[in-house]
Image (cartoon, grey):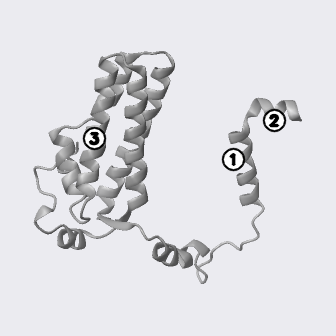
Amino acid sequence: MMKIANSIGPVTLALAAALAACRGSSAAPATKDTPAPAAKTAPAAMNMDSRTPLPLTAMMASHQKQEMRDHLKVVQEISAALTKDDFDAIAKSASRIGWSEQQAMMCKHMGAGAPGFADVGEHFHKTADTIVDAAKRHDRAGVTAALDATLRTCVGCHDTYRQEIVDDATFSKSAGSSGMDASCPMMRGK
């Protein structure tokens, strides 16, 4: 058994244990008359989350999550390229999350309802540019330091903000004059 456990890995074992625990749950399934337990606790959980709400429409929130997943993929690509000292691959991947006018517009629109969010987004993308710069110099330590700074920006943002799904009218009201318009890349389908 130990030989099998070592070949599977601790993450896989932890996932298997979590799934087994879920299967063994004695909670009764939700019925028409009794809502699922999560439905009862969701508002209470939101009240316990002291992070600043980032009001977004459902479409915007979905788009933002897609972007975050791609950012994470970029970090994985950079990590893999670092193991091979493949500085061209590092620069290519990091450039996907670097600063651009399109990123500026998205940060502005996404953060229109939460003061400071657009500034954090700008800082993230400009910090990612330092990864590209270090990669172009073939500076392994510089890439690592720049990646660390970029990830600290990610963590800081996630520690500060949380998505709050709102309807279009509520978003427009929270965004004021900074709301989305036809010039936003999100409105053109990226």
**Observer-nearest of 146 and 13:** 146
Q: Amino acid at mark 3?
A: His
Mark 3 packing: few (<14 Cα in 10 Å), some, or many (20+)?
A: many
Discs 3, 1 touching: Cβ within 8 Å: no
Q: Give coordinates of residue 90: x percent, y percent.
A: 38, 23
Q: Give coordinates of residue 60: x percent, y percent.
A: 29, 56
**Residue 5: numbered disc:** 2
Describe the element under mark 2 as helix, strand or loop. Answer: helix
Which residue corresponds to the image point at 78% horizontal and 62% vertical from the top-left?
24
Describe the element under mark 3 as helix, strand or loop. Answer: helix
Of the numbered discs 1 and 2, the one sitting upstream in the chain is 2
- Residue 103 sits above or below residue 119 on the image: above
Q: Give coordinates of residue 128: x percent, y percent.
A: 31, 35
Q: Amino acid at mark 1?
A: Leu
- The mark tally for this picture is 3
Mark 1 packing: few (<14 Cα in 10 Å), some, or many (20+)?
A: few
- The residue wearing badge 1 is 15
* Separation of marks 3 and 1 at Cα, in angstroms: 33 Å
Which residue corresponds to the image point at 13% horizontal and 62% vertical from the top-left?
178
Mark 2 packing: few (<14 Cα in 10 Å), some, or many (20+)?
A: few
Instruction: Single out the mark in the foreground, 2 or 3.
Output: 3
Q: Amino acid at mark 2?
A: Ala
Left or right side of 36 for 94 = left
Q: Give coordinates of residue 181: x percent, y percent.
A: 12, 56
- The residue wearing badge 3 is 125
Discs 2, 3 touching: Cβ within 8 Å: no
| Residue 173 in view, yes or no | yes
